[in-house]
Amino acid sequence: MSAGYFAEADPKRILTEYPIGESFLAGPARMSDDELRALQERRFAALMRRGWEIPFYRRHWGKVGLEPGDVRGIDDLPKLPSFSKSDLMMSVAAHPPYGDFHGMDGAAGRRSVVMHTTSGTTGAPQPLFFGAWDREVQNALLARAYRLQGLTDDDVVHSVYGFGMVNGGHYIREAILHFTNARLLPAGTGLETRSEQQLELMRRFGATVIVGFADYIFKLAAVAREKGLEPGRDIPIRMISGHLSTDGHAAMAKAWPGAAAFDWYGVGDTGIVAAEGPDHDGLYIWEDAHLVEILDPDRLAPVDPGRRGNICVTVLFKNTIYPVIRFNTNDVSTLLRGRGALGINFRRLEGFRGRSDNMVKLRGINVYPTGVGAILSEIEGLNGEYVCRLVRRQEREDLIVMAETRASAVDDPSALAGRVSAVLRQRLGVAVIVELAPPGGTAKLSEIDWRQKPIRLIDER
């Protein structure tokens, strides 16, 4: 990066406005409701001014009759129509190759631009743009989460986030190296560094923390045991920060004994939005940096706390290249009631509970593939790896759950399949078809060895 990038980013100003560690706990975390609202209003006003300069927003908001000045504050936020990835991809199709949802045109000579893409898990990869300021703010906010969860300068962090065009590995590397003094092992996915080699790196360099998507962290534990290593003893990890399912803490504690596991939530467009703290009671929303709403998936209107819906995010600091104003992530969650035990005066998010656009309605019951994975991880005899296949048979839709076993040979596969089927029916509320696979038997379908986010649902209808 050029010196201009860091001059634009202004790290000292970032740590003043978005502090981390003890400065966060003594500052923004202790703001009163009125102080926090005043701060949000100031940042929202600057964001809206920038939004009206972007062709995508002028068109999107103009379709519902809005003009500059119609949205005067946060109370008017619901007047603005939300947007989703499909709107961004239509922008790219109409204005290739970058779309018109950014402010690069006429500004590239004056502002630094960082470009990545999404992983393409739910469709074609979407371009992502960051200015120097908002890129480094999101890095600081991730470092804030890691510090809250217990990361110290003495830790050796093993990261299994992917590199290439996706944002993940680069984002984590920047956050740790720019805003902490911990050492980083940027191993990446299994495609970039084989699982066996990753385990050797962790042992050789004394990794104490693992960060990444839970699916691959579970896989590393399974591979370690296959090689005769005991996670927690031979590889004494003390902290894991990833992206956990509903019941993921118990499964992670079993996979990596002795490690405290933490969840956090964010997407490529927003950076980190919320993070779990030591109280393990929901994810604290960084409300000095984000406005979070939960929308009814059908009406796209805000719902009350306690009700499930789509996470919709307005990013208060992204006011340079690509403003994010009411982005409907299609990720499902709930706003928890009340405040958490840490004394942080921010609202809390339940955490990621699936995708509304990846949900399967099976005989009237909503089934989320990620929820299936959380259940499978608790069943003795399975290693937690799986793929769901949605099929149509004789005018009836069925969900086939392919679940990997712990061993290549199972003493009584029929009994294990029956037990898995019974547990899934009881927990999901609907019957599914269970097919057992040997260790690694679903890898080609899930693409877990090279995808940052494995494929968990294949629609074969």
Image (cartoon, grey):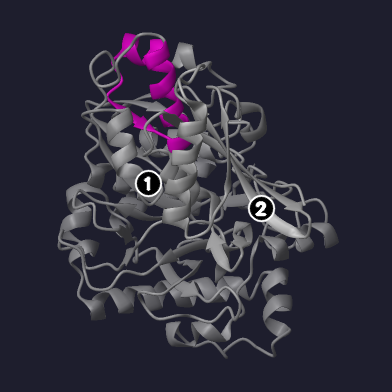
Q: Within the image, what quadrant is residue 143 found in?
A: top left
Q: Within the image, what quadrant is residue 83 found in?
A: bottom right
Amino acid type at mark 1: Leu
Mark 1 lies on a secondary structure that is helix
The residue at which mark 2 appears reads as: 398
**Which residue is at 57% across, 20% downward?**
192
Residue 386 x %, y %: 54, 36
Instruction: Indicate which disc, 2 or 1, sits on the residue closer to the N terminus.
Output: 1
The residue at which mark 1 appears reads as: 142
Q: Is the Cβ of the residue at disc 2 closer than 8 Å to that at disc 1?
A: no
Disc number for residue 244: none
Residue closer to the observer: 348 or 11: 348
Above or below residue 399? Residue 175 is above
Above or below residue 87? Residue 58 is below
Q: Which residues are magenta?
A: 199-226
Is residue 8 a member of the stretch shown in magenta? no
Residue 39 x %, y %: 33, 73
Mark 2 lies on a secondary structure that is strand
Q: How many marks?
A: 2
Q: Residues within 10 Å of mark 1 (few under 14, many from 20)?
A: many
Above or below residue 129? Residue 53 is below
Amino acid type at mark 2: Asp
The image quadrant where one finds the N terminus is top right
Residue 212 x %, y %: 43, 35
Q: Within the image, what quadrant is residue 99 found in?
A: bottom right
